[in-house]
Amino acid sequence: MISSGDALKSLALEAALSPQEEKLEIGRKKQKLFIGIPKETEFQEQRVALVPESVGLLVANGHRVLVESNAGKNANFDDNEYSESGAEIIYDTHEVFKADIILKVSPPNEQEIKMMKHKQILFSALQLSAQPKSTLVKLMEKKITAIAWDYIEDESGSFPIIRSMSEIAGTTSVLIAAELMSNANEGKGLMLGGLAGITPPELVIIGAGTVGQFAASAALSLGVSVKVFDNSLFKLRRLQNEIGHKVFTSVIQPKVLEKALRRCDVAIGALRVPHGRTPCVVNEEMIKNMKDGSVIVDVSIDKGGCFETSKITTHQKPTFKKFGIVHYCVPNIASRVSRTASYSLSNIFSPLLLEIAERGGCEKIIQTEKGFRHGVYIYKGTLTSSFLGESFDLPYKDLDLLISAF
């Protein structure tokens, strides 16, 4: 007679050996995105977040894209191009802000925040220096999840959009200098390039970051004599390695810098600091001693500038003269080449949006991607940036703790 214990063991063995139901991995549920691209209203902002080709890619993947009429006009993209790419052209700004995700280049102003709906997702630049406290408060009141695209990190820990815009600014600064030195712009009639038998022009670059690197690379390709100054030896070494060319480099020693400025034809300010004002390393006396008709392009003017004589100018009136030196001090140089800059932005935004959809929504990617989380400064109405919280005396919470709570 078989005992009850043996019977149970036999049944368990039989169950273990019997065919089992196959367990398949449950795929992630893709999300269809509803994206709104309003027309930029900030002064001198001429870029657009997505170009027609990228809109076409998103629409082909089943996403819905609203584009406000003339949103791409300043970058020379017309409504017809967006329409043919599958976008819905919207003539009422309020309708664009009904989308689930708002994609902008510049931060929203108070009027735009009024049009935003509760629990919306916002992608835009943060622009700490221009961010008023009231803007943050109103975004928090509407339970917005706000992501600063300039603070999103990639796999290497760098900021892809800041780098991209800095590359454009560095190259463009040299082209601007070349224009300003020509007779057509009442310059000294000097060609920014090297010719056999003629001493090449001299260019001083202050700052060895991405802007400085690309300015140096562009100038060297023209045959210009280049000198680069920075207080970071690491950046100076990296610049030489990246451009693959030995150039004169120096830490910022006032006497050495003054001597270089006295002899140069063009000086480019390319210093960048993570927070606060750019240090002013070139005083008036140094500028007075520069050659008459020389050109200063202060790319650092976005954060105050590194030349004492710098003051903000516009694309409409970009230059002024001080001590006989031509100054170009327009913030946001990338907007000067808005079509190129828009393509560059779009090349980063469109794959990011497709990944968000593939992961099942923005919240999922916030939970799983540390680099993306780095760009989140408001999460469902709660401020998560310690820097903003301390700067504006606003309460903030750690994003990792918030994610675990939600």
Image (cartoon, grey):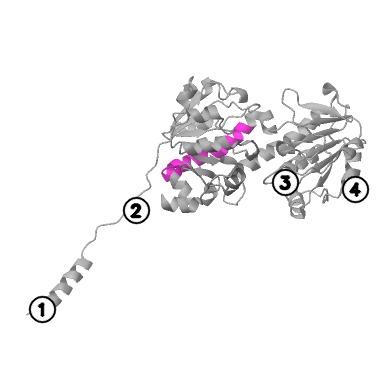
Q: Is residue 113 left or right of residue 170?
A: left
Which is nearer the N-term, disc 4 or disc 2? 2
The residue wearing badge 1 is: 3
- Residue 348 in the magenta stretch? The answer is yes
Q: CA distance from mark 1 to mark 2?
A: 41 Å
Which is nearer the N-term, disc 3 or disc 2? 2
Q: Secondary structure at mark 3?
A: loop
What span is in magenta?
341-362
Q: Amino acid at mark 4?
A: Lys
Q: Amino acid at mark 2?
A: Glu
The residue wearing badge 3 is: 209
- Judged by depth in the image, the label closer to the viewer, 4 or 2, is 4
The residue wearing badge 2 is: 25
- Residue 43, x across and y down, in percent: 64, 26
Rendered residue at 55%/49% (across/down): 371
Q: Secondary structure at mark 4?
A: helix
Q: Residues within 10 Å of mark 1 (few under 14, many from 20)?
A: few
Q: Quadrant of residue 119?
A: top left
Which is nearer the N-term, disc 4 or disc 3? 3
- Judged by depth in the image, the label closer to the viewer, 4 or 3, is 4
Q: CA distance from mark 4 to mark 3?
A: 22 Å
Which is nearer the N-term, disc 1 or disc 2? 1
